[in-house]
Structures are given as C-alpha cells and as structure tokens.
Image (cartoon, rainbow, N blue to C red):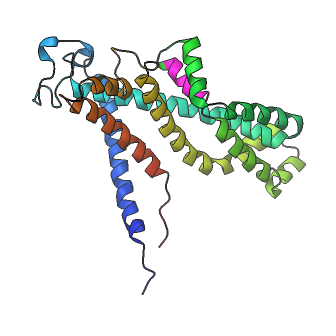
C-alpha cells in the first residue's frame, strides 16, 4: 500500500482550483465591465436608492441609487490594476537593488543595504501616508505610493540569493571569458531568480490589493465618485444595520481575492 496522504494535502489541490476559478472570473468580469457604460456605476439617482434585487440591478443599488454590481466590478478592476502596477514596480526596484548590491559588494553593498535597513525599520503604512499627503491622490499616485514602499524585503532576499549565485562555477566562468557585468547579471543570475520572483510577485500583489483597499478606506486612495472596495466598505459601514449587503459584498470580494492570491503561492505537498 502506498503512503497515506494527509487530509489537508488531499483538499489543497481542489481548494486551489476554486481560488483560481475565482480569480479568472474576477479578471474576466473586470475586463468586461470596461465596455459597459459608467452611468449606472457613477451617476446618482436618489429615486433608485436601496432597491432590491432585480433584473435591472442584480445586486440592488446603494444609498445614491448606483448599481451595486457594476460598482463591485469597477472596484475589482481598480484593485487589480493598482495591485499589478505597484507589484511590478516593487519587483523591478527590489530586484535591481538586490542584484546590484549582492553582485558588486563592498561599499556599494553597504550603502544600498544601509538605505534598505533604514527604510525597512520605518512603518510602511506611515511612509505611504506621508507620500500621499505630500504628493496628492489619484490612481497613479496610489500605485507609486504602494510600489515604492513594498520592495525593501524583496531587495534583501534577492541580495542573499545573488551573493550565493555569484560564487557559482557558471558565473565565474562567464567572468573569466570576459563577459560584461551587465550580461552576467541578465543572462546568468537573473534566470535563477525567476522562480523566487514568481512566488514573491503574488505576495506583493496581495499586499498591494490590501493596501489599496486600506488607503481608500481612510480616504487617501480612490476618491468618490470613483469605485473601490475600500470606499465601498466605508459606505457600507454607515448602513450596516438596515442594508448589510452594502458592506458584506465588497468585504467578501476583498477577502476572497486575498485568500485566492495567498493560496496560489502554496506548493502542493507530495504524497
């Protein structure tokens, strides 16, 4: 008889498939809503406030008569765009700084890692809040605020991996035959970092989606009448007693998205 698979290991692949299905549906719906008119999502009509479920409004309307389903999809679109852009920016900066620091070493390494240690010791949320207060608001600024403050841990991980790779035989051989440092970094070291970066990208994406919702909840992210899960949760807290769906729907979408991204990072255990 073969080795018995633990109960949680048997359930993990199915759970991962369901989370992947949720992300696919979210991506498809967020892409498709781009081609729908914005009137139902942004234009206020107080005569339609808090209407129930209907064919015209499958999830009803909010306190200002706006279609709740369209606002949820618009909010998901904003969260995914901000998360993806911020994650790409953080990946680029963290990978670049970590590779240069680990490969060059010496004073460059001490200078770069000293700066990283200083910023890493500061509260990330405080850095983002200060950035938004002094620079302003907007989707582009929000992407910058999150992307510029999420790469510190990644830089330290990439530096440690680069320190190990630069002593490998294939890197020493490439240096011995006269290849440039740029080519060694891009052709020999970077390909060995891609598996690590792919896993870390999902972590950065989930962190960015969460921070976008948090900043919008505080009023520093997406501003009304723009739609975001964060500001929809704020609106839902004001009518929680009479209309709980106004809070539960955006909160559920946010939680499912974060759980899905975290689940995709897990490796299936071998039997």
**On the picture, is 90 further left or further right than 219?**
right
**On the picture, is 94 further left or further right than 106?**
left
* Residue at x 84% of width, y 36% of height: 110
Query: The N terminus appears in which quarter of the rendering?
Result: bottom left
Front position in the image: 59 or 38: 59
> x, y percentage for residue 144?
56, 23
Q: Main secondary structure of the magenta part?
A: helix
Q: Is residue 188 visible?
A: no
How many numbered marks does the figure carry? 0
Kindly indicate the quadrant of the structure image that contains residue 170: bottom right
Q: Is residue 215 visible?
A: yes
* Direction bottom: furthest residue: 1
Examine the structure image and report whether residue 111 is included in the region drawn in magenta: no
Query: On screen, 58 above or below 2?
Result: above
**On the picture, is 138 further left or further right than 72?**
right
Kindly indicate the quadrant of the structure image that contains residue 257: top left
> x, y percentage for residue 224?
35, 15
* Residue at x 59% of width, y 25% of height: 126
Examine the structure image and report whether residue 147 is included in the region drawn in magenta: yes
Magenta segment, which residues? 140-150
* Residue at x 37% of width, y 37% of height: 254
Front position in the image: 264 or 165: 264
Query: On screen, 48 above or below 183?
Result: above
Query: On screen, 183 above or below 269?
Result: above
> x, y percentage for residue 132?
54, 17
> x, y percentage for residue 167?
83, 54
Kindly indicate the quadrant of the structure image that contains residue 228: top left
**On the picture, is 40 further left or further right than 77?**
left
* Direction front: furthest residue: 241
């Amino acid at each position: 008889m073969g080795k018995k698979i633990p109960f949680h290991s048997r359930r993990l692949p199915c759970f991962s498939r369901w989370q992947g299905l949720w992300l696919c549906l979210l991506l498809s719906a967020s892409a498709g809503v781009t081609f729908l008119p914005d009137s139902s999502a942004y234009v206020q009509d107080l005569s339609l406030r808090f209407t129930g479920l209907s064919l015209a409004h499958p999830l009803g309307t909010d306190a200002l008569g706006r279609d709740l389903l369209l606002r949820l999809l618009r909010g998901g679109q904003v969260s995914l765009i901000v998360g993806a852009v911020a994650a790409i920016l953080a990946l680029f900066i963290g990978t670049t700084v970590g590779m240069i620091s680990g490969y060059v070493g010496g004073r460059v390494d001490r200078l770069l890692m000293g700066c990283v240690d200083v910023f890493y010791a500061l509260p990330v949320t405080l850095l983002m809040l200060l950035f938004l207060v002094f620079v302003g608001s907007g989707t582009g600024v929000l992407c910058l605020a999150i992307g510029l403050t999420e790469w510190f841990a990644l830089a330290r991980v990439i530096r440690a991996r680069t320190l190990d790779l630069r002593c490998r035989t294939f890197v020493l051989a490439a240096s011995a035959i006269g290849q440039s440092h740029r080519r060694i970094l891009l052709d020999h070291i970077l390909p060995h970092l891609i598996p690590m970066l792919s896993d870390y990208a999902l972590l950065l994406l989930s962190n960015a989606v969460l921070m976008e919702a948090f900043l919008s909840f505080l009023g520093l992210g997406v501003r009304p009448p723009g739609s975001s899960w964060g500001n929809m949760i704020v609106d839902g807290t004001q009518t929680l007693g009479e209309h709980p769906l106004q809070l539960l729907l955006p909160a559920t979408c946010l939680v499912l998205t974060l759980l899905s991204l975290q689940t995709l990072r897990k490796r299936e255990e071998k039997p």
